Amino acid sequence: MSGRSSEHVLIDDLSDGESPRLEGLDDEHVRRLAKTEEPLPPIVVHRAMMQVVDGRHRLRAARLRGAVRIAASFLDCPADDVFVEAVRANSAHGLPLSLPDRKAAAARIVRSHPRWSDRTIASVTGLSHKTVGKIRREQPDGGVPHLERTGSAVAAEIIRRNPEMPLRQVAKAAGVAVSTAHSIRRRVTQAGQELPARCEQVRPENPGNPDATTVLRMLSSDPALRYTDTGRALLRLIGAHPPTEDEWRRLGEVVPAHCSLAVADLARDFAAAWDEFATRLACSAGYLPQPNTPG
């Protein structure tokens, strides 16, 4: 998580989040950090939830010194990956995680990311893949993620805490579709959450939005897609679409007039097929009712 630009943020705006350390923070380490005169590295913060991913000891030390702001770099990732990134960071530098810490972290990641291989989880936690496999077999539910960890629940939490956040950012942080984020925000509003009127406007999707590239990069790093034939086929299909408006315009300029109608018909057919595919995914994930099923 190095190499990011940083900025100073208000400490009161930050949430400590969950630590991968079973015993909590080391008070002696906090006091040592508070006394140092050298500038400390920026902490890492999940942008959508303003939750600390890496640097809880540094944050506690800053509070001990009475600081109002702290240097922070931002991480954009699905909310379910925040704990993973915290474990990865704490395994790589700073005060190392204990063996019980790493085993407990592996057990949690097995449940939250059940399709990840033992070797992938081992690379995050600093354990051997055999140890991770043993931890997986010991899980009472076989490593199946619990319902409360679904993307919908995460999106609802983000919307309640950040009602003005654009839907696209909510969707990316929670790992859900923009349409799903819109439906969740509507349900949150109907439940009595006051939201600004301007938040009710859904801006049209923009093929040139850099977030699309970010989402594709995130999907490409998911082992469940990256290391299977069908997953790679899906990534190739998604990645085949030009990511910018200029590329769409240039493609349109090379289509001869006598071919325009045929290309337009094909584009509409492909769009309809993708829309049907998206609906099928949303239904299978439980975000939409199954066809012919009372809603």
Image (tube, grey):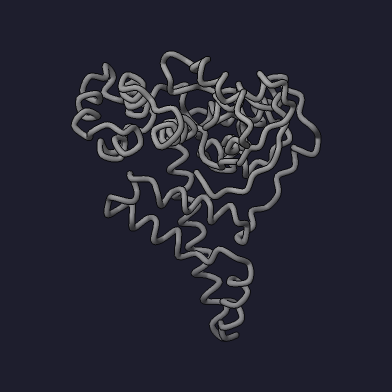
Nearer-the-camera pick, 252 or 271: 252
Residue 166 quadrant: top right
Which residue is located at x 62 percent, y 44 percent? 168
Nearer-the-camera pick, 98 or 47: 98
Q: Position of residue 6 (x, y in %)?
A: 64, 44
Which residue is located at x 69 percent, y 27 percent? 11
Q: Does residue 284 show up?
A: no
Q: Position of residue 170 (x, y in %)?
A: 61, 38
Q: Position of residue 51 (x, y in %)?
A: 59, 29
Would you say 25 lies left or right of 165 here?
A: left
Relative to residue 63, is residue 241 depicted above or below?
below
Q: Position of residue 114 (x, y in %)?
A: 32, 32
Which residue is located at x 49 percent, y 63 percent? 269
Nearer-the-camera pick, 82 or 276: 82
Would you say 87 lies left or right of 5 here?
A: left
Residue 62 quadrant: top right
Q: Does residue 155 show up?
A: yes
